[in-house]
Image: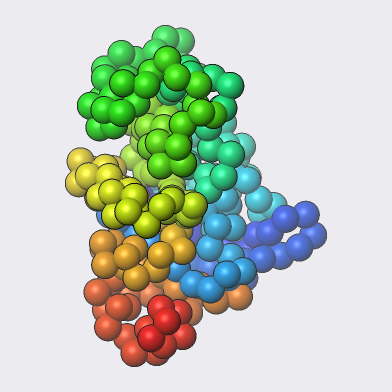
Amino acid sequence: MALLEVADLDAGYGDLRILDGVDLEVTEGEYVAIVGPNGAGKSTVMKSVFGLTTYMGGSIRFAGEEISGLRPEEIITRGVGYVPQTDNVFPSLTVQENLEMGAYILESIPEERLDDVYERFPILEERSTQKAGTMSGGQQQMLAMGRALMLDPDLLLLDEPSAGLAPDLVADMFDRVDAINGDGTAVLIVEQNATEALKRCDRGYVLVQGANRYEDSGEALLGNERVRRDFLGG
C-alpha cells in the first residue's frame, strides 16, 4: 500500500519553480532514495513533502490524505518525521532537551520513546546533559535523527544525512538508517553519496532539472550503464 504518493508535483520558492511534474511513491516500510546532480531539485522534493516550499500544483498524499498546502506542524502530526541537512539541532540545548523538542506537540514526553532513542543511539544517553552545539558532526546527525523518531513516525525524511561527515562515519550512518528501516519505518532519503544510497535502498529515483529521469530498484539503477556514466561517476 502506498504510504506517500507524489503526483505531477510543481513546487519551488516564491515565484521560482524548481519541480516540474515530479512523481514519486513510497510504500509502507519501504526504503526509497532520490539521487541526481546538484541543482536537480532533490531536497526541494523532500521539503515539499514537509510543507516547506511554495506549492504550485499536483498532489501530495500521505496515508490516503492530501497534505499539499499543510504546514509542517500539521504534517508532523500525520506521522512524518523530517531531518534537514543543516541547522538540524538546537545548539544551546542539551541532548535530552533536543530530543524532548521532538515531542513538543504532546502534552508529556513519552518515556518509552526516549528510551527507544537512547537504545538506538547509546552515545546520546551518555551525553544527555551535553550541549548539542559542542558535539561532533556525526553525533549531531544522530541527535537530529533521534529527535525525528521521538513521535515514532511512519515515514522518515532524511535530507543528505552523510553531508559533512568524515568518511569513516558514513557507513555507520547508513547502517543506522538501515536499522531504522528494518524496524518498520519507511525512509525517503536524499543523498549525495548516490552509489551507497542505491546499494541499500529498495527503489530509487533519479531527478534531473526538477523532473523524473529514471525510476527503478536500487540494484537496477546501479546496473544501468547510462545512470552509472551520467550520475554515478562511471
In the rendered image, which quarter contains the C terminus?
bottom left
Residue 144 shows in the view: no
Q: Nearer the viewer, residue 77 or 104?
A: 104
Vertical arrangement, residue 83 with respect to residue 199, above or below? above
Percent x, y for residue 152? 33, 31
Percent x, y for residue 13? 72, 55
Vertical arrangement, residue 169 with respect to residue 10, above or below? above
Indicate left or right for 197 with 48 as reference.
left
Residue at position x 45%, y 37% in the image: 136
Percent x, y for residue 103? 44, 21
Residue at position x 42%, y 81% in the image: 233
Percent x, y for residue 232? 41, 78
In the rendered image, which quarter contains the N terminus?
bottom left
What colour-coding does the image apply? rainbow
Residue 65 shows in the view: yes
Farthest residue in the left direction?
Answer: 182
Question: Could you tell me how many numbered marks the image carries?
Answer: 0
Indicate left or right for 145 with 218 as reference.
right
